[in-house]
Amino acid sequence: MSSKKTSFLSRNLFEHEIIKDSVFLNRDIMTPHYIPSKLLFRDIQIKEITTNLAPLFKGLRANNLFLYGKTGTGKTATAKFVLREFEEFASKNKTTNAKTIYINCRIHNSKYKVLLKILANLYPDKDFIGFSSTFLHEKLMEYLDENSMKLVLILDEIDKVKDVDELVYVLTRCNDDLANASITIVGISNNVFFKQRLDPRTRSSLCEKELVFPPYNANELKAILSERVSLAFKKGAVSKSAVALAAAIAAQESGDARTAVLLLLRAGEIADSLQKKRVEEVDVLRAKESVEEEIILSMINTLPEHEQLVLYAIASLTIAKKGIKKISGFSSNNTLSQLSDVVLISGEIYEEYLTIAEKLKGNAVSLRWFQQYINELEMHGLIAVAEAGRGFRGNTRIIKLAYDAEKIKNIIEKNFS
């Protein structure tokens, strides 16, 4: 037995892991949970949110605010960044009792669960599980009134709340009965059309402002990554070309900062596993292969349920090899020809979606909303779309899946199981 192997076996397994060399200085900085001390390229959005919430410190009410944008455009990070400043200022400003509560609506996905989460924050020593929604609502009102509190609720992925109409309506109507207190909603959603699906009475009670976060371009992503790398990795442990490649891949995929950061995180882990001192382009390319499924999973999980079902219909038809295998007029270098070999017509996808939606959800969206979902899936890069052209009636569109149909189908099935 070699002395090197003897040395390895003589050490505790965890001791070996801890003392081995790494390209990382602080790996946590490359995780999605890290909020930078400064946010690049989001000055406009930071200013808008700050301006909207500032009246609370003057004893006034603030408008509800909705933040829209694709995954990885900095919505949550920006909101948390501003709210960290809000809490810091509130602790110094004794004239106003102001507080923020962040709620992940993917976890707390009903009105009841959201109210429970709020009260758990306000009454940390009490347990309200089992009480009625009415009681929870009254307890919330009582607390806010007694403490003259200006409460800011950050509802991340608000579109995941099953009874979102009821939740929004109840929270906004609270303000009608609060004299010296208020509730301000900061809703975050990947779906810019989320509000349109709310009941008209709920929309009329909102009194809200909207803010859309655009995707990052390659140069912005490169700057964001360079900032992270300087804090997360040892000096000189990541080549400039590796940073540029990760930024270019993420920009091409979706302009998603999370994807760019994840690529470099995985590239660093690959470099460590190979006992390399430096992350190079080849490590980023290896990382791209390993994180593709993570990226797809992240994108799909942020989609509204019926949008997932439209994607599921496309994947199912693709696997069944239905649709048109070849369409004249599309050259070999066309975007669609580089993806799945099955081309589908929007009409047949809608019919498949209707069957699936009725089976799994008991209802389906209209053709107008279906067409909007197709546009959004194309925007996310999950499908490619083109006009059918000659030989087809009306505004028929042809569609191809951009990722592996089996993987997409399996992910969505898990979400509805």
Image (cartoon, rainbow, N blue to C red):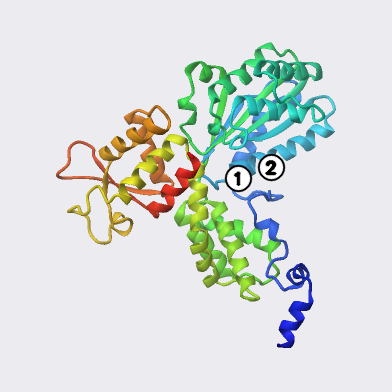
Residue 363's image quarter? top left
Residue 216's place in the image compared with 211, above or below, is: below
Residue 133's place in the image compared with 76, above or below, is: above
Q: Earlier in the sequence, mark 2 or mark 1?
A: 1
Callout in the foreground (2, 1): 2
The percent position of residue 276, horizontal first and vertical second, equals 63, 76
Residue 223's place in the image compared with 181, above or below, is: below
Which element is circle 2 on?
helix
Question: 298 left or right of 50?
Answer: left
The percent position of residue 140, horizontal first and vertical second, equals 72, 20
Residue 22's image quarter? bottom right
Q: Residue at x 59, y 63 (%)?
A: 266
Question: Which amino acid, by three-letter code, is at mark 1?
Answer: Arg
Q: What whole-number distance in Å separates the C-alpha atoms at marks 2 and 1?
A: 11 Å
What residue occupies the far bottom of the structure in this picture?
2
Question: What residue is shown with label 1?
Answer: 42
Q: Is residue 54 visible?
A: no
Question: Which amino acid, by three-letter code, is at mark 2?
Answer: Phe
Quadrant where the N terminus is found in the figure: bottom right
Residue 351's image quarter? top left
What residue occupies the far front of the structure in this picture?
1
Q: Residue at x 51, y 68 (%)?
A: 286
Q: Residue at x 37, y 48 (%)?
A: 383
The percent position of residue 411, horizontal first and vertical second, equals 47, 47
Q: Crowdedness of circle 2 by 10 Å Cα count: few (<14), some, many (20+)?
A: some
Question: 135 left or right of 341?
Answer: right
Question: What residue is shown with label 2?
Answer: 81
Tally the numbered discs: 2
Q: Is residue 387 visible?
A: yes
Is label 2 in contact with label 1 (beta carbons under 8 Å)?
yes
Which element is circle 1 on?
loop
